[in-house]
């Protein structure tokens, strides 16, 4: 029987790579995203390449009504969710606090924190009902160290770190694993979104060193899920070799 993984934010970056990795391992995939055309096209691509089933759900994790409508009443054949990967998230802007945009702050908090809470709240009942499951939250090294002009984005990822720890404690009686993956600099759409479509600024972010790639995080997520039932990786900070911490890089 195929296992089921549910991945938010699966139209690009980490989410897309993770879905591809699990599909290649013969897992059935529930993929979610806001961009309907991209999401459904990716679902078709997975179905063509692998002998699996794919359920693509278009909604915004920021909107609890949409989350509940899509996830709280999954079709019976999709309710046996083995793994939830909370990947949907973003950074907006690189300004000092006094110059920050409240609209950007709201979007980051509503997506990175509240969206993760909404999705997890909707999916956990499927896991507690059977006393097993695995939740992987995609955090960030920004949830470990605050850096200049990171303020609210860092705060949102610190919150993800705390929520992950709380979930691990609260869900212990249900034998549900909870893992935080905390990537450093990664060449995805992340910087393009952060700089609001400024491709030159986004490109400069990764000049002079080899960053992480989405496939790297997908491989690590697969490894975490593949461990024996009695083993859980709680917290894993992952950087490229050229990154020493949240702000120090060796560039050539």
Image (tube, rainbow, N blue to C red):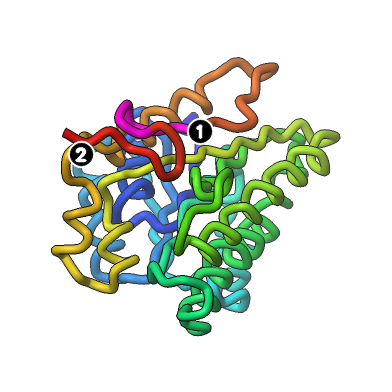
Q: Nearer the viewer, mark 2 or mark 1?
A: 1
Mark 2, other Cα within 10 Å: few <14 / some 14–19 / many ≥20: few
- Where residue 161 appears, x then y in whole percent? 64, 47
In terms of secondary structure, where does tag 1 sit?
A: strand
* Residue 164 visible (yes or no): yes
Which of 113 and 228 lies nearest the eye of the viewer?
Answer: 113
Question: Where 66 falls versus 88 (above or below)?
Answer: below
- Where residue 198 appears, x then y in whole percent? 19, 70
Quadrant (top left/top right/bottom left/bottom right) for the C terminus: top left
**Residue 49 circle label:** 2
Q: Is residue 72 left or right of residue 47?
A: right
Picture quadrant where residue 233 is located:
top right
* Residue 51 visible (yes or no): no
Residue depicted at 56% across the width and 41% down the height: 136
Mark 1, other Cα within 10 Å: few <14 / some 14–19 / many ≥20: some
Picture quadrant where residue 172 is located:
top right
Between the C-alphas of marks 2 and 1, the distance is 32 Å
Which of 127 and 210 lies nearest the eye of the viewer?
Answer: 210
Question: Where 188 falls versus 184 (above or below)?
Answer: below
Question: Where 232 falls versus 70 (above or below)?
Answer: above
- Where residue 79 appears, x then y in whole percent? 60, 50
- Where residue 61 appears, x then y in whole percent? 52, 68
**Contact between labelled residues 1 and 2, with CB atoms less than 8 Å apart:** no
- Please check the rendered image and state whether residue 74 is part of the magenta-colored stretch, yes or no: no
Segment colored magenta: 237-243
Which residue lies under the disc numbered 1?
Answer: 237
View extreme (right): residue: 173
Picture quadrant where residue 48 is located:
top left
Question: Where 12 falls versus 69 (above or below)?
Answer: above
Residue depicted at 54% across the width and 31% down the height: 236
Residue depicted at 18% across the width and 54% down the height: 204
């Amino acid at each position: 029987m195929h296992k089921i993984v549910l991945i938010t934010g699966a139209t690009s970056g980490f989410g897309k790579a993770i879905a591809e990795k699990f599909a290649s391992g013969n897992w059935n995939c529930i993929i979610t995203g806001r961009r309907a055309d991209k999401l459904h096209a990716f679902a078709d691509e997975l179905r063509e390449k692998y002998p699996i089933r794919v359920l693509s759900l278009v909604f915004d994790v920021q909107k609890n009504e949409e989350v509940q409508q899509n996830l709280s009443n999954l079709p019976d054949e999709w309710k046996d969710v083995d793994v939830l990967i909370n990947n949907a998230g973003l950074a907006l802007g690189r300004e000092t606090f006094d110059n920050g945009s409240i609209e950007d702050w709201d979007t980051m908090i509503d997506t990175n924190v509240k969206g993760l809470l909404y999705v997890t709240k909707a999916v956990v009942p499927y896991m507690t009902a059977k006393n097993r499951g695995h939740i992987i939250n995609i955090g960030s090294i920004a949830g470990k160290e605050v850096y200049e002009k990171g303020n609210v984005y860092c705060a949102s990822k610190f919150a993800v770190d705390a929520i992950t720890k709380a979930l691990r404690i609260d869900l212990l009686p249900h034998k549900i694993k909870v893992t935080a993956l905390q990537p450093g600099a990664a060449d995805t759409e992340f910087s393009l979104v952060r700089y609001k479509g400024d491709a030159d600024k986004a490109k400069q972010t990764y000049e002079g060193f080899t960053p992480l790639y989405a496939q790297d995080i997908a491989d690590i997520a697969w490894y975490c899920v593949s461990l024996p039932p009695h083993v859980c990786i709680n917290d894993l900070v992952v950087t490229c070799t050229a990154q020493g911490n949240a702000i120090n890089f060796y560039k050539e």
